[in-house]
Image: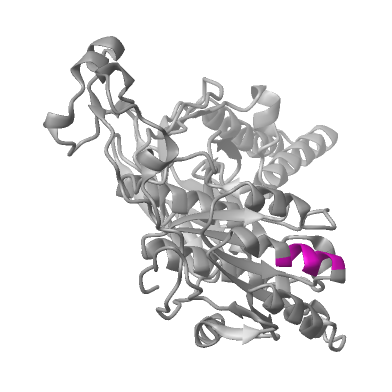
Amino acid sequence: MSAGGRPAAADGEKGGKDGKSGKSGRGGNPAGLRAALGGLTTRGRSFLAAGAAAAVCAYVLGQSDLLRVGLLLAVLPLMSVIVLYRTRYRVAGSRRLTPARVPAGSEARVHLRMDNVSRMPTGLLMLQDHVPYVLGPRPRFVLDRMEAGGRREVSYRVRSDLRGCYPLGPLQLRLSDPFGMCELTRSFSDFDTLTVIPRTESLPPVRLTGDASGYGDGRRRSLALAGDDDVIPRAYRYGDDLRRVHWRSTARHGELMVRREEQPRRARCTVLLDTRAVAYHGVGPDSAFEWAVSGAASTLVHIAERGFAVRLLTDTGTSVPGTGGEDSPGTPQDAADSAGLMMDALAMVDHSDGYGLTRAHEVLRTGEEGLLIAFFGDLDEKQAALVARMHRRSGAAVAFVMDSETWAGGGTGHVEDRLRVLREAGWTALAVPPGASLPALWQQADSRRGEPSGGAAGGVGRAGTNSGGGS
């Protein structure tokens, strides 16, 4: 039922089947007449009971007129059940989310469309969509009679203050007879997913340094200076100069291939998010961990908008996108897909069971220079020393360290001691008090650029091989 997909259909004969991108499906008929009898409403059961009671009284009292009344009362709900059970409505439904990815605290609208694809008009239909309770109350709609080939459209809003991925669906249709004696429920088998990403804040432009030195293919590969066979080609991309076509490789691979050229490398940035459960105290939208997740999301958006090749790294060593890709800018669609992957990862990120940052350090140690921006929870003396060593391969490093005990109202911890260790190693390290504004801290990090601390210069603009652009 996603946008652009085929509609799902509910009828009285066939069972469920999920399709591909459109997720089409078919709702099944209730299992047998017994299930239809279970759909009797309170009114229908009351009529049935009254008819049975009247029939018994008529037999005891010998009143034939009362027996006819009892039979009428009993037959009416049973006839409603049979008529509704034999109904062969074919109704197709589709769902569209606008947008499918929404920040926490913002609303998304869900559009539902029902189409009568049968040759007979429908009766009164009651439509219900299954929605997790965190998104709001379960929406219910009453659809009046739909003519053959008719269409009805309804919509509702959903909102969540908690990030995550929430399923919407499946849709349920309730069919009712004109007398309200019986209701049957027929369900669609498909559903959609609403992704609630962390809140992001607009950050002020500052001078950041990422690694933009060297050239892409020339630095990574040693190409021979002579011999056409030693040229390393790549697949043709839209917009490539046709004069760069390498015909021998084209004939060999069966697709158009072009010679690689020296391309300036993009400035790189790694956003490190500490997710260790032992590093944070408190839960809820206003907790220190949620502040760190929101800060990482804001940083990713801000850095990516300024042309950096950015990746998200957690303490578990998980990197999104993967570290094996090219540094070439790629297409705008590729950049949007990468940003979407990182935001989806932040929407679902949770506390890890680890006690240290060793895995993240191993990833950074095997990588290349670039800007490093980290969001840490509580750091003990050992982890602070390990974080200090992470700066060795980065062009500049900024750390936002949260004293979770202060966030939880338990007093002040040892955050200043940890900041001193990081600053002596060249980090621009800032403490994050409860309710702090990330744009203000971002500006403060820029103002501390190049300030000496323990003989080492730290800052957002620490000199690299080539200076990065205004960010």
Magenta residue span? 382-388
Q: Position of residue 412 (x, y in %)?
A: 84, 88
Q: Residue furthest left?
A: 243
Q: Residue at x 77, y 80 (%)?
A: 403
Query: Residue 444 versus residue 368: which sits nearer the camera?
Result: 368
Counting from the top left corner in percent of width and height, residue 9 is at 44, 31
In the image, residue 73 sits, relative to residue 254, either above or below, namely below
Residue 7 placed where, x, y %?
Answer: 39, 35
Q: Position of residue 101 (x, y in %)?
A: 47, 56
Residue shown at 27% from the left, 23% from the top: 226
- The answer to which image quadrant residue 459 occupies is bottom right
The foreground one among 42 and 400 is 400
Magenta span has 433? Answer: no
x 52%, y 39%: residue: 324
**Above or below 34: residue 159:** below
Query: Position of 464 compared to 248: left or right?
Result: right
Task: Please state, as top left, top right, bottom left or bottom right, where the C terminus lies in the image.
Answer: bottom left
Q: Residue at x 42, y 61 (%)?
A: 304
**Quarter of the picture holding the N terminus:** top left
Magenta stretch: helix, strand or loop mostly: helix
